[in-house]
């Protein structure tokens, strides 16, 4: 079953890609929007509840702002909070993020288990980035707050890595681009490579469900088909969007 959460006036919410820490709106408004998205995920049966530690989320945000080298990012403050909250609530024991660039997308998910925003203990946190130089940058960034060395940042193609993984994945985050301009159409291939590692209750998060909906149409049709996933919801909190699907 497919669900949609659409924040009011989301088109007027302008993300500053090259100024990732700029406040776009009052914090209270950001919280209201994300709370609405979480309520939709609860209603859809994707999350068990919608509450999370907001103080820890802000501690996570401050640590990223103070320590990370982020040349640009499409992760808005709303999306950062939503990704953190989903992970904080679902508490996946194994989280895998594919296409992490400089590490900001990875830590937006893993920050619920790593660094000052940690609210639970995970077994394995993996970030995959095909470009070795960016994987190195992501590793350096994450190490600034990952004092217990919990994260694995790997320079690898996500599809063969996912095909070979043996650990059950509790949460899979997709944010990679395919070769030769294929863009987000690669999401379905990545998902299919990981299906053997997904269990009932696993979550799959796909960034760009709004701005890349056309190239993601095969992926979106697949996760919104109840024969494949129990529930799926499109989180339109900004102009990028996030599809959240429950296996």
Image (cartoon, rainbow, N blue to C red):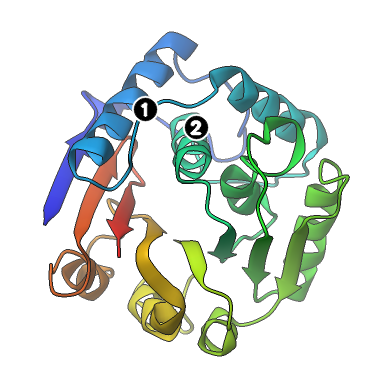
Instruction: Give the numbered dot on residue 177.
Output: none
Q: Is residue 118 above or below residue 209?
A: above
- The residue labelled by disc 1 is 34
The image shows residue 84 at horizontal and vertical percentages of 53, 38
Residue 142 appears anywhere in the view: yes
Query: Where is residue 102, by image quadrant?
Result: bottom right
Residue located at (49% from left, 32% from top): 81
The image shows residue 182 at horizontal and vertical percentages of 38, 79
Marks 1 and 2, the one that precedes in the sequence: 1
Q: Secondary structure at mark 2?
A: helix
Residue 183 appears anywhere in the view: no
Q: Is residue 109 above or below residue 154?
A: above
Is 95 or 21 nearer to us in this picture? Answer: 95
Is 142 or 217 nearer to us in this picture? Answer: 142
The image shows residue 154 at horizontal and vertical percentages of 73, 72
Residue located at (13% from left, 69% from top): 225
Residue located at (27% from left, 70% from top): 215
- How packed mark 1 is, by other alpha carbons closer than 10 Å (few <14, some 14-19, many 20 or more), is many
236 sits left or right of 168 in the view = left
Q: Are marks 1 and 2 in contact (CB under 8 Å)?
A: yes
Residue located at (79% from left, 29% from top): 66
Query: Where is residue 189, by image quadrant?
Result: bottom left
- The residue labelled by disc 2 is 81
Query: Where is residue 202, by image quadrant?
Result: bottom left
């Amino acid at each position: 079953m497919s669900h949609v959460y659409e924040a009011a006036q989301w088109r007027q919410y302008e993300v500053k890609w090259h100024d990732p820490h700029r406040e776009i709106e009052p914090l209270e408004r950001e919280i209201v929007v994300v709370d609405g998205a979480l309520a939709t995920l609860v209603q859809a049966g994707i999350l068990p509840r919608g509450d999370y530690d907001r103080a820890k989320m802000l501690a996570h945000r401050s640590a990223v702002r103070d320590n990370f080298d982020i040349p640009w990012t499409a992760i808005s403050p709303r999306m950062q909070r939503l990704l953190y909250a989903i992970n904080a609530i679902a508490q996946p024991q194994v989280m895998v993020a594919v296409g992490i660039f400089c590490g900001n997308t990875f830590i937006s998910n893993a920050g619920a288990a790593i660094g000052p925003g940690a609210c639970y203990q995970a077994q394995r946190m993996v970030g995959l980035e095909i470009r070795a130089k960016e994987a190195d940058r992501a590793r350096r960034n994450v190490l600034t707050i990952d004092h217990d060395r919990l994260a694995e940042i790997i320079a690898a193609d996500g599809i063969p890595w996912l095909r070979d993984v043996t650990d059950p994945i509790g949460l899979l985050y997709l944010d990679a681009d395919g070769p030769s301009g294929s863009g987000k159409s690669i999401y379905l291939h990545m998902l299919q490579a990981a299906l053997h590692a997904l269990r009932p209750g696993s979550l799959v998060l796909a960034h760009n469900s709004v701005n890349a909906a056309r190239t993601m149409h095969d992926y979106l049709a697949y996760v919104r088909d109840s024969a494949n996933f129990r529930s799926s919801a499109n989180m339109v909190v900004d102009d990028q969007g996030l599809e959240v699907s429950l296996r």
